[in-house]
Image (tube, coloured by chain):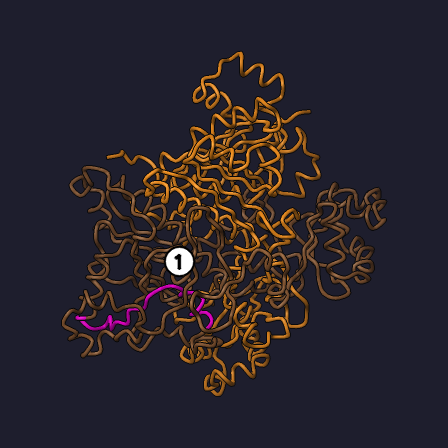
Amino acid sequence: MSEMHSAMRTTPSSVADSEAPMKAFNEMVVVDVAGSAAGAYAGKLFSDLGARVVKVEPPAGDATRWTGPLGRRGMSTTFEYLNTGKSSLALDLRSRSGQAIFRRLCLAADVIVESFSPGPATPLADELTWHDQAVRVRISPFGLNGPNARWKSTPFTDFAVAGHMYLTGEPDREPLQGAPMQSLYAAGTHGFIGALAALYARPSLGLGQDIDVSHFEVMASLHQWTTVRYTHGGIIQRRVGNRYGSLHPSTIYRCSDGYVAFAPVGNEPLGRFLAVIGMDELLLEPRFSTGAERFASADAFDAILEPWMLDHTVNEVVELAQAVRAPVAPVNTIPGLLADAHLKERAFWVLPEGADESVLQPGPPFRMSGHEWRLRPAPEVGQGSAPWVEVLDPGAHLRQAAIVRADPS
Amino acid sequence: MTEFAGGALTGVTVLDLTRVWAGPLATRILGDLGADVIKIEAIWSRGPQAVPEADVRVSGRYPGNLAGTRPWNREGMFNKLNRNKRSLTLQLDTPEGKALFERLVVEADVVIENYTPRVMPQLGLGYERLRELNPAIVYLAMPGYGWTGPSRDFAALGTTLEPEAGLSSLMGYRDTGPYKSGVAWADPVAAMHGAAAVLIGIIDREAHPQRLGQAIELAQLEGMICFIGPRVMDVQLHAPAREGPGNRHPYYAPQGCYPCAGDDRWLAITVTSDAEWVALCRLAGFDQWLAYLTLDQRLTRHDEIDAIVATWTVTQLRDDIEILLQDHGVAACSVNDARDIVENAHLVSRHFFAEIEHPEAGRHRFPGLPIQISATPAAYRRPAPGLGEHNREILVGLLGLTDDDLARLTETKVIAEAPPN
């Protein structure tokens, strides 16, 4: 964050005299200059929830359009997912004219989202993006300052540096990575939260704000008890395979046709489940009498339960357990997830509006009774920019000079 | 103009009925941003009066591994998640407790709960009732599976939702089945989506001509799936990979977790370009032919390359080669443990940690709000509350009850400052 501008924003002369009205979501303009999935996901959340999001990309198109497996429209599934409903403004930011257009666009923006990955954070020049009502979100691997601000990261190294990898995998093997891109989604969502907080405060404050979010800090803040066990009890938590914390059974068991996630660690839900399968006497044995005792004797406990599990299907185990309110769920493959009856009945999977293709995408992360969520297709390069281009390049000179690429639609 | 002494959400009152992790983290984010969060707790919600000494030692979550005379106020996980909140005990299943809660709903902006869908209607506190009391209320429910569908009443935890959402199938060694992450990852994901949803709700309300609130249904399973969207699309287009990914990346190579000198010390490296690979080979002193391997060759010969990289890293100190590689533009990071995080110089220099003095648990360093917001920064205004610490402040100060009322509520066990015996 620029110290000069943060100082400017707190001087009384720039504070509004009266409260401005709160802008509705569908009146908000968001400029998305995300270089990573983190900023793109923040922009997607704004877009699917109704804000006008303009994705600024080079005239040849953002490199992430072709990175990874391609979808039916010839763009990567990652790009397609992360840019739903945005319009694309294809603009050469290296040219002076391109920068002048971008500056005018930012003056109209409520929110400007930048993200940097895997390289260090080099924010766009202040004079391009700044105005006193702008909420500027910068999402980067290590943040905008500090000794390691210039370091590179990937989701893999984010998972390591923030303490999650050390906890994942077998104790006698190398630590293991998490699911793909999780640090980027988490950082993007935190950027979104920061932007919303600044937008909420803006009418009273009379000013926008700068938001600095790092993958490292976001992931380091999302531990359950890892740092607490160290600061309070001097314990350095290690990875414990598919077991969990210091209680058992919270684990994954193999069944006859797949795996279940099994987590009734308390004596009450576990006792109810064991009673159903006729093994409740196990809890009378001192070595299995509490969650902590069972953790200490977890191999012996599992040796008794595993043969029963292998004799039953995933569905049988889940049904028996949930009938007595024991938290047990299938370990879904992605095809299994797409076939899940609960999600189908809730119509969770959706196709983008008006898309002439059939690839389903996840629905909303939450459902609001008074706020519309829509999934619209990701844009082709320049698609949807016509209204912006008419205003920003009235003589069409920059289109001719290939600084702005025309809307293909 | 409003005076902005506090955070961005100064003046927003949140009634927090949540338990465990996802809900309390959602409300902590709101509290760190300046909201007044009133945590409403059942008198038994923090467990029994006494904790067995063995459990204290195994958990490692009590200061100095000592339960103390009031262990319910000393547990570190609770104290981490509940800073910036006030505590009001209230038995919602008693007529008096429910009536007091309803009076608070009239005064509040937001109600958040993470029960299964049956609980609030059973208490007579479903959204219809809350809206009747206060049409401006923003109500967030965070059930595992949502309000509808065949699994709606199923019990769920973060440790079951992460595998159910498909994430575990994308994890695992190359020769094993699925793995869970080391934290119950679905919980914090639900927390961040929940905090975002509440913010949208209060922005909508301020922009709405009648200032109406709304109900938000956050099915934790669904929010978790939103974090693997492209993988769900890929499977519909291409056959899924059949083996666990181990520590590999589909199109960066090498990527791996390499052993370093010392006990259980590892360095995570992703090489994202030929130039980075050349730099790594030069720094490690590898034979020249290695540096000429193309990305395709590195992907094909990944096992061989891993073995060679490990022969170098295992002779080196993790933190030394982390800096060396980063100085030369290679994404290399230590596989940090809890102590590495708590003592990390970069995090300290950015004032990431919340250093909080708790009257019954002492001073500790907790992770802070990972959102630096320029004009309204996060403030750590108060430590986690003791059980019922703000009963008087809220019931007498806000609702106008008398000392006699408090005595009677304590007598009938509607409120308390210690768990029942």
State yes or no: residue A83 in magenta: yes
Relative depth, front residue between A166 and B81: B81
Quadrant assignment for the N terminus of chain B: top left
The hue in which chain B appears in the rendered picture of the protein? orange
Relative depth, front residue between B359 and B147: B147
A290 up-or-down from B384: above or below = below
Q: Is residue A304 left or right of residue A149?
A: right
Q: For the magenta stretch, what is the residue range?
A: A77-97
Relative depth, front residue between B35 and A212: B35
Other-residue count near label 1 (Cα within 10 Å), few / some / many at <14 / 14–19 / ≥20: many
What chain is the brown one? A
> Which kind of residue does numbered mark 1 sit on?
Ala
Relative depth, front residue between B133 and B143: B133
- Residue pictured at 52% horizontal, 55% vertical: B223
Res. A310 image quadrant: bottom right
Quadrant assignment for the C terminus of chain B: top right
In which chain is the residue bearing label 1? Answer: A
Q: Position of residue B276 (x, y in %)?
A: 42, 76
Circle 1 residue = A42
Res. B325 image quadrant: bottom left
- Residue pictured at 74% horizontal, 41% vertical: A268
